[in-house]
Amino acid sequence: MKKNILLIHTGGTISMSEDNSGAVKPGAKNPLTEEGQILSGLANLIVEEPFHLPSPHITLRDMMTLKQMLDHYAEKNWIDGAVITHGTDTLEETAYFLDLTVKANFPIVVTGAMRSSNEIGSDGLYNLISAIRVASSEDARNKGVLVVLNDEIHTAENVTKTHTSNVSTFQSPQFGPIGIVTKQGILFHHMPSYHENYAISDITKKVVIVKAHAGMDSSLLLAVQDLKVHGVVIEALGQGNMPPATVPGIKALIANNIPVVIVSRAFNGIVQDIYAYEGGGKQLKEAGVIFSNGLNGQKARIKLLIALEVTNDMKEIEEMFRN
Ligand code: ASP
């Protein structure tokens, strides 16, 4: 029996076309809405199009709109699954935001495309079909928000865009996908071990990301403090170390009750307080820096924004980043 699937279009390359000059842009009509015949063979679709944006235009407000839309459908008990089409540039941020904030007992799948609708080898319709198939699968329940592109199923928590243009851009460094899409079925080979969820009604705080580099000093961190931010994520070096001249800036932020979350600028692995030299992880931890458990910078920012809606207690925020 066909499932009832909510299909939310938000924009992105998946909904754009290439013109004669090779420029890719949105048109008056989303080409995906013309694929009704193929798609309705897969599921009973309820289509929503709350906005039509390239994903660099997506804001936290737009993410909240999607959350509220999903909450609404979850309350009504009308649907068996949801698919969101989204630009790939910030897809992982929206997917992780929804993963942390939406409580639904149906699968939620986010997809996109690297090639627009009329390009040779366009992956949009194919990825959308795969996403609808995954959202219709009973096995996709209770795994958090999923990201489906290029025949792979990833968790929102681990997936990231790794290539500017390749269709296999979405990867889960360190962990890999949790399932695959084949012609015959949807196969999951891993089960996420933990899933967290936070009840929030708004996003009101400001969190910035600062990237560490060799020879860095405290000037940028002190300037950030003057911007009246509520939290800072630092993409630190290696296992979570910083150049010694940044330590006064980090300490100043913490002294002003601004949580500082450390992730690594390295692509794989997690940060740990291992090194005991000046600026090393041990000193940072003692100074009150929060070590994140494997998230990348943009996901840690989303999590810190949500954490700050739940509490302003540093210890509780640190606890949230242990998971
Ligand atoms: N720049 C586009 C966007 O994120 C890329 C894409 O959709 O793949 O909207």
Image (cartoon, helix red, strand yellow):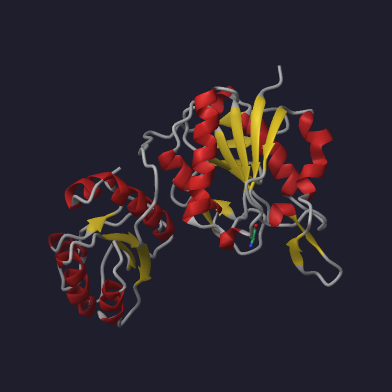
Residue 205 vs residue 115, the one in the foreground: 205
Residue that lies at the very extreme toward the right in this rendered image: 20
* Left or right side of 31 for 89: left
Q: Is 122 situated above or below 40?
A: below
Q: State the image coordinates of residue 205 (x, y, percent, origin top left).
A: 34, 57
Asked where in the image residue 298 lies, by quadrant, the reply is bottom left
For the point 21% across and 63% down, the residue is 281
Which quadrant does the C terminus fall into?
A: top left
* Left or right side of 262 for 172: right
Q: Is 81 situated above or below 288?
A: above
Residue 248 vs residue 285, the one in the foreground: 248
**Dividing the image into four equal quarters, which quarter contains ligand 1?**
bottom right
Give the tally of numbered discs.
Answer: 0
Q: Is 176 situated above or below 192?
A: below
Asked where in the image residue 77 lies, by quadrant, the reply is top right
Asked where in the image residue 17 lies, by quadrant, the reply is bottom right
Q: State the image coordinates of residue 110 (x, y, percent, origin top left).
A: 58, 43
For the point 76% across and 50% down, the residue is 30
Q: State the image coordinates of residue 321 (x, y, percent, origin top left).
A: 28, 48
Residue 189 visible at all: no
* Left or right side of 20 for 115: left
Q: Is 247 situated above or below 179?
A: below
Residue 111 visible at all: yes
For the point 17% across and 66% down, the residue is 256
* Left or right side of 243 for 204: right
Which quadrant does the N terminus fall into?
A: top right
Q: State the image coordinates of residue 71 (x, y, percent, origin top left).
A: 49, 34
